Image (tube, rainbow, N blue to C red):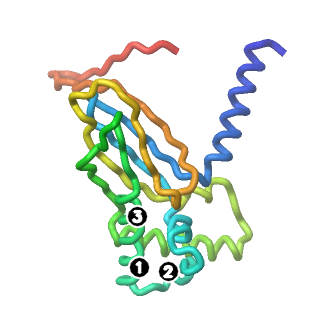
Amino acid sequence: MSLKVWILLSIIGASTFLNAHGLSMSTAHVQVRNHTHLSMRVEYDPFKLIAKMKGAKAPSLAELASMPRETLNKLYGELKLTLSQDIKIHFGSKMVSLLNFRFLSNDDFAKEVRQKFMKVTMNQSNKHHSHADVREHFINMSVDGFLPKKQKEGTLGIDFPTQLGDVMVTFSKPQTQTIKAEKKVSRYTQHIQL
């Protein structure tokens, strides 16, 4: 087997391993743009999070689906409060303040609960399961903020609540550019090296 084939097979095998083990894990995608603007998208399983928050008192999925809307909204409010209070972002020795947290609306969360309940009920009768089903009902929340402008370098630290479980974090610092409108076409160009 040639070295190129061996490297290719190793990469495919490693990515399959990582993908399979990361399926049920919360993820955080962190970006820093224009030197100070930080944005993070967290994908998590709200049902696992509620179970970890409530412990033995956690409602079952059937109980969640049949809960009065006011009670479900209150429970979702507790979930949002846990995340917004326990996610902390540090840069160097300073805490990043004035973070803006954005969550699904109460209506969208209630819809997710009903869809998950219907899907689980249908899957139990069909005995069907696939890896794609694992992340199907993960939901997103977003956090935005600004890093201290005077500090040019330092260590970025993010504290996640333990109830999220393991979190796979991806960090990027993309190059951003504003493309001016032209008469015929506006073109973006970027030299890349593969």
The kind of residue on which mark 3 rests is Thr
Mark closest to the chain's N terminus, 1 or 3: 1
Instruction: Name the residue at 63% across, 76% down.
Output: 121
Residue on which disc 3 sits: 82
Quadrant in the picture for residue 153: top left
Instruction: Name the residue at 30% across, 31% down.
Output: 33
Distance between mark 3 and mark 2 Cα atoms: 21 Å
Residue on which disc 1 sits: 72
Q: What percent of the width, then of the height, locates residue 166?
A: 57, 51
Mark closest to the chain's N terminus, 3 or 2: 2
Residues 140 and 48: in front is: 48
Q: What percent of the width, then of the height, locates residue 140?
A: 42, 55
* 123 vs 28: above or below: below
Q: Quadrant of the N terminus?
A: top right
The kind of residue on which mark 2 rests is Ala
Q: Secondary structure at mark 3?
A: helix
Residues 68 and 182: in front is: 68
Tags 1 and 3 touching, CB below 8 Å: no
Q: What percent of the width, then of the height, locates residue 184?
A: 19, 22
Mark closest to the chain's N terminus, 1 or 2: 2
The kind of residue on which mark 1 rests is Leu
Residues 92 and 113: in front is: 92
Marking on residue 65: 2
Distance between mark 1 and mark 2 Cα atoms: 9 Å
Question: How many numbered discs, if any?
Answer: 3
Q: Secondary structure at mark 1?
A: helix
Quadrant in the picture for residue 117: bottom right
Q: What percent of the width, then of the height, locates residue 44?
A: 50, 56
Circle nearer the viewer, 1 or 3: 3
Q: Residues within 10 Å of mark 1 (few under 14, many from 20)?
A: some
Instruction: Name the residue at 44% across, 50% down.
Output: 42
Q: Residues within 10 Å of mark 3 (few under 14, many from 20)?
A: some
